[in-house]
Image (spheres, rainbow, N blue to C red):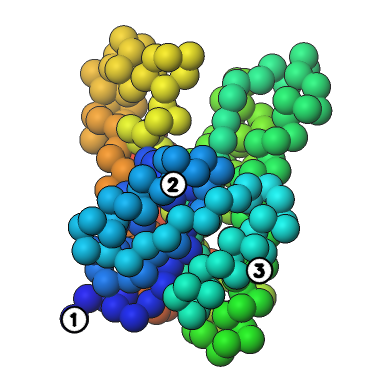
Amino acid sequence: MKRFQGKTVFVTGGATGIGFATARRFAEEGASVAIMGRRASVGEQAAHELRAAGGRAIFTKGDVAREEDVVRCVREAIDVFGRIDILVNNAAMSVPVDFVAADTDEWKPVFDVIAFGTYYCTRTVARHMIEAGIRGSIVNVSSINAYRALPASSHYNAAKGAMDQLTRCTAVELAPYGIRVNAVNPGFVDTPMSVVDGENELETDWFKDIYVERRKIPQARPGRPEEIASVIAFLASDDAAYVCGATIPVDGGLSVTF
């Protein structure tokens, strides 16, 4: 029997990259999938692809940085599928900023999507799970940048750090209700976010020199979205029944080098 037969998964930012790979993995394993995102055309296409492959999927349009959008999209998913058993907080954004030069309007949106978006979604779905008596699972897609420092990334790294700590705190508070909260911390993964100013950073000479040839990434390659999705599916499954409050790097070994 498929691990997620009869369950419903709500995936934010589920139309592309790690989010879509995750939505597809859950659909393949029998789950109904609700994708939340801001771009209707991309989201509807993603849901269509899942349905064409035999899955049950819908797209709900909304911005995780807006609590009213989150509440509405969660309600739409429940109206269609009757329940939500698993939440994957994957939505993210990042644009390079200089910490000193940037103003609040440049810094704040990234924190709003990653940190507050995770907060809004977790609280809204947890309330549903508790009310419905669902022993659910929440998986946050964080980053190894939660505990690493890079220039021009103060907003992104701080937001991912907040996500890791929110993972631990909500794991403690929701455990009495039978709800497990964990996180994955990807390193370099080949997704649309790898493209900066029209160039895929994973195909640049500096990346190949430092991370591949010099094996800063011990496995000498970037990850694939499907490889992150497989760990997310594990954490959401009964196979991880005793995993609670964990933050698991999925980075080819990058976080253990220096």
For residue 43, the mark is 2
| Category of crowding for the residue at label 1, using alpha-carbon neighbours closer than 10 angstroms: few (below 14), some (14–19), many (at least 20) | few
* Tag count: 3
Where does residue 204 sit, x and y in percent of width and height? Answer: 33, 13
Whether residue 120 is situated above or below residue 4 in the rendered picture:
above
**In the image, residue 240 lies at what x, y percent?**
36, 73
Please report whichever mark, 2 or 3, sits nearer to the chain's N-terminal start.
2
Foreground label between 2 and 3: 2
Q: Viewer-nearest of labels 1 and 2?
A: 2
Q: Residue at x 41, y 27 (%)?
A: 194
Task: Tell me, yes or no, if residue 49 can be seen here.
Answer: yes
Q: What amino acid is at disc 3?
A: Thr
Residue type at mark 2?
A: Gly
Q: Which mark is residue 1?
A: 1
Where the N terminus falls, by quadrant? bottom left
Q: Is residue 64 above or below residue 74?
A: above
**Rounded to the nearest whole Å, what is the CA distance between mark 2 and mark 3?**
21 Å
Amino acid of disc 1: Met
- Classify mark 1: helix, strand or loop: loop
Residue 183 visible in the current orientation: no
Q: Are marks 2 and 3 in contact (CB under 8 Å)?
A: no
Q: Which residue is pictured at 33% across the width and 32% down the height?
A: 190
- Residue at horizontal 45%, vertical 30%? 193
Residue positioned most to the right = 104
Who's the residue at 78% across and 27% down the image?
105
Q: Which residue is mark 3?
A: 124
Which quadrant of the figure contains the C terminus? top left
Name the secondary structure under disc 3: helix
* Cβ atoms at labels 1 and 3 below 8 Å apart: no
Q: Where 257 sits versus 13, above or below?
A: above
In the image, 170 versus 82, the foreground residue is: 82
